[in-house]
Image: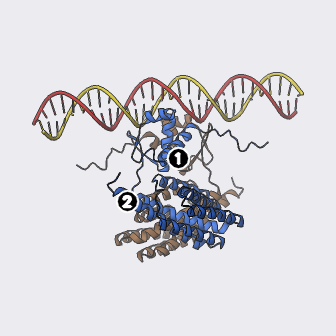
Chain colours: A brown, B blue, C red, D yellow
DNA sequence: CTCTGGCATGTTGTATACAAAATGCAAGAG
DNA sequence: CTCTTGCATTTTGTATACAACATGCCAGAG
């Protein structure tokens, strides 16, 4: 008897609500700074206030909401400073993931990553940004999986979700894009050579580049007079 | 008019309950694996189930509880594997803290750390383990503060709390203790020299030593027949 | 005209009642 | 004797009612 996969996917309401809200926040439907009215939201989501409040607590723990006593929940508005800090931590975590992965990676893993790299290069060649981001995410998740440290993965994921709320996608200048793809090639080479230190440095540099790109985008979004 | 410091310290019930539970878990009053009965606990804490459940969600987010649908909350029991993983991540984070701190530290900061180091050496000389741990914690917190990255500090604190639930204190063999104190001396030297890379390496080594000590302790706690 | 004080309204915080699910036990069939 | 199946009890999940607090408006005094 192997029913291991099906607890019938039953998901508690608070978790379902949290997931839905997470999506709304990341996609920007709920803009940063928005104050969340419990009664209103609970009606929209079709749940009562009790599970919704539990969802708030979860999202607050993830850093997506802030809760002020007697004044409810509010979608966080990450400042450029916050983004800078988050990227610094992300870099450190990815660096560790790389080091660990280099000690555990199998030839099969590397084959899989090479295939993904090829997909990424194709997306790059076609200037298909959404596909690029999607594959990029898969590769980094894969790296984390190879590292085999669940706590690292969880910490990484949480921070990554927070950064996604910045919605910095859809802005990436060609030079940086080329550079990023090249870095990915180096990553896989370092991994194939089981050179953890090199991989670590590449990943930290990779994150630092992303950080700079995002910070520039954020600066540009604040400055211009347009709408 | 400067009332900036006093919102009269009003703390919501869920937060108060979470803090209390956190303490109970870290101190071991609520042992790992314990299942938490909502009704019972709510009576003991003098709050109703609603804020208690919100507290559960917060602690679950911190990784101190696990929540199973329709089966309530349970104090997490960290395995040796989990502890190893957590220490790996902690090391990476402390390393980053060191690197950042080296670029921002002031002479005044260093003076303060030297004073703490003196206190630590005194505690070490008197074989005062509780004092040693207390000062140790202050020093590491101070380092994080100097690093000036709130996200890093928050991530670090959360992980640290989780590890504290292991209650590995009160076990530390003399040789490792001597070594740890010596490493602290090196830390401050590297910081004074603004040598971020060196400080990083020292901190990662420092954490790795702690990791090994804890893993040994955990192994010994499982093996012996005593009790 | 401006500022202060009080009130009305709306929103969050908490408790409790009710519904649904899980657990343990016991009785009966094999 | 063992295993299954149904029921009673316990526990969690959700909704809702009530209380406490915050916010905005209006009136009246200065």
| Residue in front for this viewpoint, A196 or B219 | B219
- Res B152 → quadrant: bottom right
Q: Residue at x 53, y 53 (%)?
A: B158
- Residue A61 drawn at (x, y percent): 53, 48
Q: Are marks 2 and 1 on the same chain?
A: no
Element under disc 2: helix
Q: Residue at x 54, y 51 (%)?
A: A26
**Residue at image x 69%, y 65%?**
B111
The disc at residue B69 is: none
Which chain does the residue under circle 1 lie in?
A
Does the rendering let one see residue A22? Answer: yes
Subunit that carries the residue with mark 2: B
> Disc 2 versus disc 1: distance between alpha carbons?
39 Å
A158, A175: nearer the viewer: A158
Q: Please, is residue A169 above or below residue A7 in the view?
A: below
Neighbor class of circle 1 (other Cα within 10 Å; few <14, some 14-19, many 20+) is: many
Q: Residues within 10 Å of mark 2 (few under 14, many from 20)?
A: few
Residue bearing mark 2? B220
* Residue A84 screen position, x and y as percent: 62, 61
The front one of B92 and B31 is: B31
Is label 2 or label 1 in front? 2
Question: Which residue corresponds to mark 1?
Answer: A59
């Amino acid at each position: 008897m192997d029913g291991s996969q099906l607890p019938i996917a039953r998901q508690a309401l608070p978790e379902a609500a949290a997931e839905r809200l997470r999506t709304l926040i990341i996609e920007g439907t709920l803009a940063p700074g928005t104050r969340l009215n419990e009664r209103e939201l609970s009606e929209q989501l079709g749940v009562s206030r009790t599970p919704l409040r539990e969802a708030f607590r979860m999202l607050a723990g993830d850093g997506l909401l802030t809760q002020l006593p007697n004044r409810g929940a509010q979608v966080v508005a990450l400042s450029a400073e916050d983004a800078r800090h988050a990227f610094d931590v992300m870099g450190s975590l990815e660096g560790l993931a790389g080091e660990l992965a280099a000690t555990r990676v199998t030839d099969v893993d590397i084959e899989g990553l090479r295939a993904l790299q090829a997909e990424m290069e194709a997306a790059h060649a076609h200037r298909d940004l959404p596909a690029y981001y999607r594959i990029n995410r898969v590769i980094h998740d894969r790296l984390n999986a190879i590292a085999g440290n669940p706590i690292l993965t969880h910490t990484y994921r949480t921070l990554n979700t927070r950064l996604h709320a910045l919605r910095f996608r859809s802005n990436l200048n060609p030079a940086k894009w080329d550079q990023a793809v090249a870095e990915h090639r180096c990553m896989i080479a370092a991994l194939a050579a089981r050179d953890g230190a090199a991989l670590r440095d590449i990943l930290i540099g990779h994150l630092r580049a992303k950080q700079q790109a995002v910070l520039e985008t954020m600066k540009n979004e604040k400055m211009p007079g347009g709408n």
